[in-house]
Image (cartoon, rainbow, N blue to C red):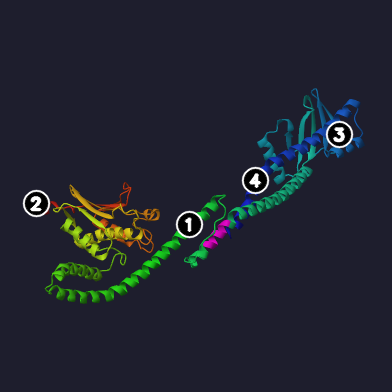
Amino acid sequence: MSLSSKLLWLTILFVMIAEVLIFVPSVANTRVRWLAERLNTAAAAAVVIDAVNEMELPQSIQDGALMATGTKAIVLRKDGASRMIATADMPPVVTHQYDLSAVTPVGAIIDAFDTILFGGDRVIRVYGPVADDPAMQIELVLEDAPLRHAMLIYGRNVFLLSVLISIITASLVFFAINRLLFRPVRRVTENMQAFSEDPENPSRIIVPGPPVDELSAAEGHLAAMQTRLQQTLKEQRHLADLGLAVSKINHDMRNILTSAQLMSDRLAMIDDPMVKRFAPKLLRTIDRAVSYSGEVLAYGKAREEQPRRRFINLATLACEVRDIVTEETEAAITYVLDIDETLEVEADSDQMFRVLYNLVRNAVQAFGADPIDDPALVQRIILSARRTGAVVEIRVADTGPGLPAKARENLFQPFRGSARSGGTGLGLAIARELVIAHGGSISLDETVTQGTAFRIELPDQPVPLDTFRARA
């Protein structure tokens, strides 16, 4: 059974329950009203007859009065005296009696159901005051079969009317809720099913209606979620394709780099000043490339290799990054190294090189993507560092155009945090992953008004107490 069908039947049931709650006191009032009408009719006739004379009425007149009131006997009590107004030839035996001047709500309900369930063949006595005059009372003796018949007819009419009201009410509620609730829910459900079958199809994204209620807001949130999911799936597919491409390139590149390494070793043996100058840098660059190719590159595997930490000279590493980047570009960029020559940082040398190289390389690409028109402004990249206790703070800043708003919103996110058109944003993402692997942090310096600056904080690795004592 569908949810709408359940609602329809529950609405009918609840309306019927409400009608039953109304029926109970109403059927009790119907019984009291029926008896009161008979009592008032008999009282009117009795008062008129009593005023005419005190003589006994002929039996024919008594029978007419009894037939008109539907009773077996009529008694008028006045000033402590009783007068038989009319009676049948054989007065019946009374089994129940009721005082209409002392009827309570609970008593009326109990008497009503007693009449419906067990009445029909009983003779009852009913009495009450005439015109609210306690000195004059009218008393009737009658069968309860007509009363029970009238109550059953009333109950049948109430039942049929309740069923009709229940059906009409349930139908109105059903159509209203079906239009306001079930139809939008069904639309959302069908869309979710269709979207799950083909989540990469843009046409499967739900088109939300006007934001007029909670369901419209839910449709809007669903549309936003589906849009983000499609973007994520697109990025995941991009990553999968990238991973496959990296695996293919890595397979062949490793062999090529190995051959280049052998040729570089032979090249280093040539006795030429220029060769002597560039051969060591070339060898170190190829060694790093071979090392990177020997492992799965960042974002081509589940996690980065754990850093092999040791104390390295940060100034030497920064100079090496500067020299490599200088050889890669012909742009007129001034490099400023504000690092103490004795400053050491406990880190993985290759991974720290990648961090600084990515940051400096991004700064160089930013200069090329948005050249500075003002000749008075110098293109400058500043690498600075200082130690505070067990933490080394490294700062890479430039005087370039700065990061655009989109890049700031998606900072350190691959394929979304690029600051230039056609970029992948992997440089910052890789740098962040490597810094976090060292237990440090990397963040954008928001206080810079010109250019871009990144701040890196690297803590020294904790030393076990036994190792510290052994060194001491």
CA gap between label 1 and label 4 equals 44 Å
CA gap between label 4 and label 3 equals 44 Å
Q: Residue furthest top?
A: 79
Specify the amino acid type for callout 4.
Answer: Ala
In the rendered image, is residue 88 in sight? no
Please give the label number shown on residue 86: 3
In magenta, the rendered stretch is 184-191
The image quarter in which residue 353 lies: bottom left
CA gap between label 3 and label 1 equals 88 Å
Which callout, 2 or 4, points to the residue nearer the camera? 2
Which callout, 1 or 2, points to the residue nearer the camera? 1
Q: Earlier in the sequence, mark 2 or mark 4?
A: 4
Q: Position of residue 383 (x, y in %)?
A: 23, 54
The residue labelled by disc 1 is 224
The residue labelled by disc 2 is 469
Which callout, 4 or 3, points to the residue nearer the camera? 4
Q: Is residue 52 above or below residue 251?
A: above
The residue labelled by disc 4 is 18
Specify the amino acid type for callout 2.
Answer: Arg
